[in-house]
Amino acid sequence: MKYHKAEKDTDIANNVIARQLETGYRVGILKTQALLAKKGIAVGHNRLARIMNENSLNPKFNRKRYPPEYYAQKNASQKNQERENVLNRQFDAKCPGEKLVTDITYIKVAEGWLYLSAVIDLFNSDVVAFVMSNQLNVDFAIKTLNALSDNGHVPQTECIFHSDQGFTYTHEKFVEALKTQGFRQSFSRVGNC
C-alpha cells in the first residue's frame, strides 16, 4: 500500500505523539528519530522537525543554566552599591599579588551541584587559592578569600581583586572582608564574566 505524503506525515505525527506521551514531552528531534527508527519508521530529521513544529510536539522543558540558589540570591543582591571597574581589562601585572581575579564555577554532579571558587594571580596566571563546596553562599566566597592568606599570599598595596557582579561578590559581608584584608575591589560590567 502506497502512502501519500500527507498521509505519511499524519502517520509520523501520530507516532511522535505516542513517543512524546511516553516520555513526557522530554525528547527532541534526534532522540525521536531514533525511537521511530526502532519502530521501523524511517524519517529524515528535517522532515521530522517540520512535522513536530507543525503539530506542536517539541519537548516541553525549561532547563535552568544554574542551580535555584543562584537565581534566588542573585535577586537579593545589593542594588545600590557603587561598582567600579578598576581593572578595566588591563590583564597584565608587573609583580605578583598586584591583580587578582576570581570566579565561581558550577559543576553538575549526580547528587546535585558542586561549586568551585578560584583566585588567579594575573602576574603568572597561577591559581593562588581555591575552595570547593556543595553550598553557594557568601561564606563560600569568604572562605576562598581566607584561603589566600592561609596559603601565605600577601597582597601588594592596593591589590586589585576583580570579579563579576554576582551576589557573592557584591554582598556587604564580602565587601567588608575585602577591605579588612586590604584589597581594592573591581567589577566587570554587567553580563561580562
Image: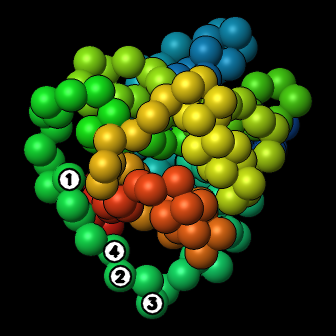
* Contact check, label 4 and label 1, Cβ < 8 Å: no
Q: Position of residue 126 (x, y in %)?
A: 38, 18
As displayed, is residue 118 above or below residue 33?
A: below
Residue at the spot 41% in from the left edge and 55% down from the top edge:
183
**Tag 3 secondary structure:** loop
Residue at the spot 35% in from the left edge and 59% down from the top edge:
184
Residue at the spot 47% in from the left edge and 42% down from the top edge:
103
Q: Which residue is mark 2?
A: 82
Tell me if 16 is positioned left or right of 22 in this view. Answer: left
* Contact check, label 1 and label 2, Cβ < 8 Å: no
Instruction: Find residue 172 and report its image quarter.
Output: bottom right
Q: Position of residue 40 (x, y in %)?
A: 65, 10
Among numbered discs 3 and 1, the one appearing first in the sequence: 3
Q: Which residue is mark 3?
A: 80
Q: Which residue is mark 1?
A: 87
Tell me how far mark 2 sits from mark 4, CA to CA. Answer: 4 Å
Tell me how far mark 3 sits from mark 1, CA to CA. Answer: 21 Å
**Tag 2 secondary structure:** loop
Residue at the spot 65% in from the left edge and 69% down from the top edge:
173
Tell me how far mark 4 sits from mark 1, CA to CA. Answer: 12 Å
Q: Amino acid at mark 2?
A: Glu
**Tag 4 secondary structure:** loop
- Disc 3 packing (10 Å; few <14; some 14–19; many ≥20): few
Q: Which residue is mark 4?
A: 83
Quadrant (top left/top right/bottom left/bottom right) for the N terminus: top right
